[in-house]
């Protein structure tokens, strides 16, 4: 049996629709809905479902992706579950997908996180993975042109994953956080997701800490899931949150020195105001 954590923030209908599908999955023991102190209230929905699998936890404050999901992961671990999934409300996947990932983790103790290929909408596709960024990656990622260059680095890898029809799985360094299965013993061992981040870069910190403790991450190639979101842009008014999370990774994982911190601050300063400018220009174009 495995549990599933769904972190909600003002996504009531998406969360309800996902839960209605998951309750019929045979190997799902618990579905933990964690509401990150949003305007939604699932009390009546839980009553109407009348399903012992459902657990509803209303967080007293919105502390972000990592802290919110940790509430659900800790609940499952403390109630005897060894395997769990994190699923954003806006993802869709079949029972066979979670079963394949669960069976893979069950048979491979050295893998702490596993997911699968991802589609965006009906036509787009991606590998939903990347390599752990080094300091220079973090530096150039502060600015728009640097992010575009890094995106191009992984395109060939995505094509390889989608064209591979023989392999069962593909080892990666970092799995995206929208949907993945995990070994809760390993997650507990490293202290769960890093709650110094609010959004972004939590997957990198998780992967770094797991790798340091000898664990691997992988993508299963015989299944996939769909992510129906509007792609997050770093050129927006939340870019400061992203830059903060990136600094957490650089400080706590890469342990960069003072000189590198100063250089990173300069690039982050440029990137922050560049992002504000892009956001303003995009808003003006949209309004016209």
Image (cartoon, rainbow, N blue to C red):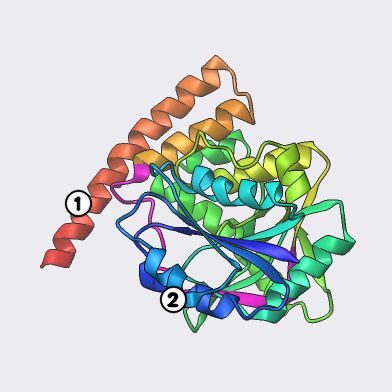
User: On the rendered structure, is 136 left or right of 233?
Assistant: right
Q: Quarter of the image holding residue 209?
A: top right
Choose mark 1 or mark 2, whichever is in front.
Answer: 2
Q: Residue at x 62, y 40 (%)?
A: 205
Q: Is residue 171 magenta?
A: no
Name the quadrant containing residue 191: top right
Q: Residue 10, relative to residue 117: is it above or below? A: above
Q: Is residue 278 left or right of residue 248?
A: left
Q: Give the residue pinned by disc 2.
A: 48
- Examine the rendering and report whether any part of residue 120 can be seen: no
Q: Out of 277 and 186, give the one closest to the viewer.
A: 186
| Residue 68 coordinates in the image, percent (x, y) | 50, 47
Q: Label 1: state its secondary structure.
A: helix
Q: Label 1, label 2: how many angstroms apart (C-alpha)?
A: 44 Å
Residue at x 51%, y 33% (from the top left corner): 196
Q: In this rendering, does residue 1 appear at all? A: yes
Residue 280 marker = 1
**Above or below: residue 58 compared with residue 266:** below
Which residue, as the protein is rendered here, is positioned at the far left?
Answer: 288
| Element on which disc 2 rests | helix
């Amino acid at each position: 049996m495995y549990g599933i954590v769904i972190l909600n923030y003002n996504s009531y209908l998406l969360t309800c629709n996902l839960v209605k599908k998951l309750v019929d999955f045979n190997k799902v023991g618990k579905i933990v809905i964690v509401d990150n102190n949003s305007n939604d209230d699932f009390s009546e929905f839980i009553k109407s479902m009348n399903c012992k699998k459902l657990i509803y936890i209303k967080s007293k404050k919105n502390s972000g992706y990592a802290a919110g999901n940790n509430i659900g992961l800790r609940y499952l671990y403390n109630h005897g579950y060894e395997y769990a999934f994190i699923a954003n409300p806006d993802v869709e996947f079949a029972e066979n997908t979670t079963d394949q990932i669960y069976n893979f983790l069950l048979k491979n103790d050295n893998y702490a996180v596993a997911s699968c290929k991802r589609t965006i909408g009906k036509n787009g596709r991606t590998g939903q993975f990347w390599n752990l960024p080094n300091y220079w990656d973090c530096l150039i990622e502060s600015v728009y042109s640097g992010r575009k260059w890094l995106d191009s680095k992984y395109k060939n890898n995505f094509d390889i994953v989608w064209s591979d029809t023989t392999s069962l799985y593909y080892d990666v360094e970092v799995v995206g956080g929208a949907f993945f299965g995990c070994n809760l013993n390993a997650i507990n061992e490293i202290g769960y997701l890093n709650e110094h981040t609010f959004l972004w870069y939590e997957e990198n910190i998780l992967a770094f800490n797991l790798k340091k403790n000898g664990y691997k991450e992988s993508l299963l190639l015989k299944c996939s899931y769909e992510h129906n979101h509007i792609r997050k842009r770093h050129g927006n008014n939340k870019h400061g949150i992203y830059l903060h999370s990136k600094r957490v990774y650089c400080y706590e994982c890469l342990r960069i020195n003072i000189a590198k911190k100063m250089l990173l601050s300069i690039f982050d300063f440029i990137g922050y105001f560049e992002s504000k400018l892009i956001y303003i220009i995009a808003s003006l174009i949209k309004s016209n």
